Amino acid sequence: MGNPTQSAGLAGVVAGRTALSTVGKEGAGLTYCGFAIEDLAEHASFEEVAWLLFTGELPTRPQLEEFTQRLSGQRSLPAGLRIVLEQIPGSTHPMDALRTGCSMLGCLEPELHFTDQQRAAERLLATLPSMLLYWYHFQATGTRIPLESDEPTLAGHFLRLLHRKPPSAEHVRAIDVSLILYAEHEFNASTFAARVAASTLSDIHSAITAAIGTLRGPLHGGANEAALELMERFPDPDTAERGILDLLARKEKIMGFGHRVYRDRDPRSDIIQKWAQRLCQRPEDQQLYAVAERIHAVMRREKRLFPNLDFYTAPAYRALGIPASMFTPLFVFSRTAGWAAHVFEQRADNRIIRPTAEYIGSEPRAFVPIEKR
Ligand code: COA
C-alpha cells in the first residue's frame, strides 16, 4: 500500500480528481468547468451555472429557458413533506429544518436508479427554498403560504416568498450573484461528505443530507451567520477595532476570515464586497458596512488574513432584509448544484472513499472479565 500521506485535517492531501472547479490554482484562480468566477458572476445567472455544473457546458438560450422553466415548474411540496415541516418547532435552526426536509423528500420521492439522478437533483434545487419558507412562515404566523410565484429564477422566488411581495431587479441580481459565488468549491468539507456518501453507492438524498449537516458548522457555511453576529456586536468602527484586537489577544477565530486553500485572497470576496457596499444604503446598513471594513483592515494589519466569501455576504444579505439564520440555508440552495454535480462525478468513476488512520491507542492487552475490573 506504500507510505500513505498524513496531514491534520487532510490539509494539502489530494483526495481525488474533479473536472468541476479549480480553487486558487496558479494562473486560473477560481473556475467552474474552466470559466472564471469573475465572468460567471458578471454575465451568467445561477440557473446557467447549475446547468454548467450538471452538464459541463454552458447552456444555449433554448436550453437555459427550458431548464429554468423545468425548475420553476416543480417548486410545490408533497403533502407529506408539508406535514413534516409543520411538526418542526419554530425554535429549530433553519439548517436543521432543511436537513430534515431533504431527507423526507428522499422518502417520498426516492431516487429510483442512478439514471434518475439529475431529475432528483433538479427537484431538490426547486424545492429547498420552498421547504425553508413554508416552514418559516408556518411557524412564525401559522400561515400556509402558496409556494408558486411568477418569479422565473431561484433568487427571485426566494425573495418573493420571504418578503411576500415582488422583489426589485437589483435585489434579485444581488442574490443571484451570491448564489453563483456559492455554487461550487472543489473538495470543501460538505462536498467531500457528499462524495463519501456517494462513494458507498448510497442515494443522492443521503449524500445531500450529509452535506447539509456538514455545511452547518461555523468553520464552514455557518461562518456567514457568525460573521454578522460578530459585526453586529459593534456600534462603530473604533469599538470594532478594540473588540477584534481583544478577540485576537484571546486567540479566538474571527468568523469570515481565512481559508484552507487560498493564501492571499478569496476572489469571491472582492465581488460580494462590491455588492455589499452597493446594497448598504440605509444609515444602519452603512454603519454595519463601516464596521465590516474596519474589521477587514484590522485583520489584514494584525494577522495578514483576508475575508472569505462569508464575510461581506453578511452585510449584503442583511441589507436585503434576510434573517441571519437564513444565510447558511441560502448557501445550501446554491451549493446543492455543486454537491449534486460531485455526486454525478463520483458515481461516474467510483471507488469507495475509505482512508486509513494512524493508531495512537494502547498496546495489545489481555481482556479483563467484568467481575475483575
Ligand atoms: N481568525 C483568526 N485567526 C485565524 C483565522 C481566523 N478566522 N483563520 C486562521 N487563523 C490563524 C490560525 O489561528 C492559525 O494561527 P496559528 O498558526 O498561530 O495557530 C493560522 O491562521 C492557520 O489557521 P488554521 O486554523 O490552521 O487554518 P485551517 O486551514 O485549519 O482552517 C478555516 C481554515 C477557514 C477553517 C479557518 O481559517 C477558520 O476557522 N476561519 C473562520 C471560519 C470561516 O470563516 N469559515 C469559512 C471558510 S470559507
Image (cartoon, rainbow, N blue to C red):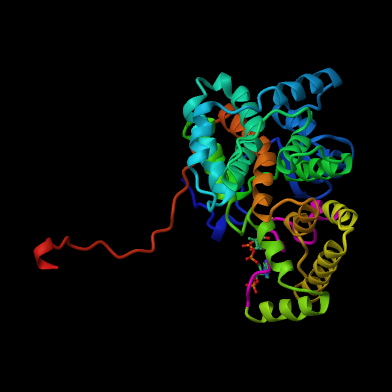
Residue at image x 75%, y 54%? 309
* Quarter of the figure with residue 254: bottom right
- Nearer to us in this view, 270 or 226: 226
Q: Image check: 339 left or right of 63?
A: left
How many labels, in total?
Answer: 0
Q: Is residue 96 magenta?
A: no
Q: Eyeballing the image, is 310 above or below 338?
A: below
- Nearer to us in this view, 106 or 59: 106
Q: Where is residue 232 in the image (x, y as percent from the top left)?
A: 73, 67
Q: Image check: 358 left or right of 211?
A: left
Q: Image check: 249 left or right of 275?
A: left
Residue at image x 88%, y 54%? 274
Quadrant for the C terminus in the image: bottom left
Range of magenta residues: 251-270
Residue 196 shows up from this direction: no
Residue at image x 76%, y 67%? 305
Residue 101 shows up from this direction: yes
Q: Eyeballing the image, is 130 above or below 246?
A: above
- Nearer to us in this view, 221 or 231: 231
Which secondary structure dominates the residues rendered in magenta? loop
The residue sitting at the front extreme is: 142
- Nearer to us in this view, 152 or 342: 152
Tell me which image quadrant ligand 1 sits in: bottom right
Q: Eyeballing the image, is 38 above or below 230?
A: above
Q: Where is residue 111 in the image (x, y as percent from the top left)?
A: 52, 24
Q: Where is residue 310 in the image (x, y as percent from the top left)?
A: 73, 56
Q: Position of residue 353 (x, y in %)?
A: 50, 40
Q: Is residue 263 magenta?
A: yes
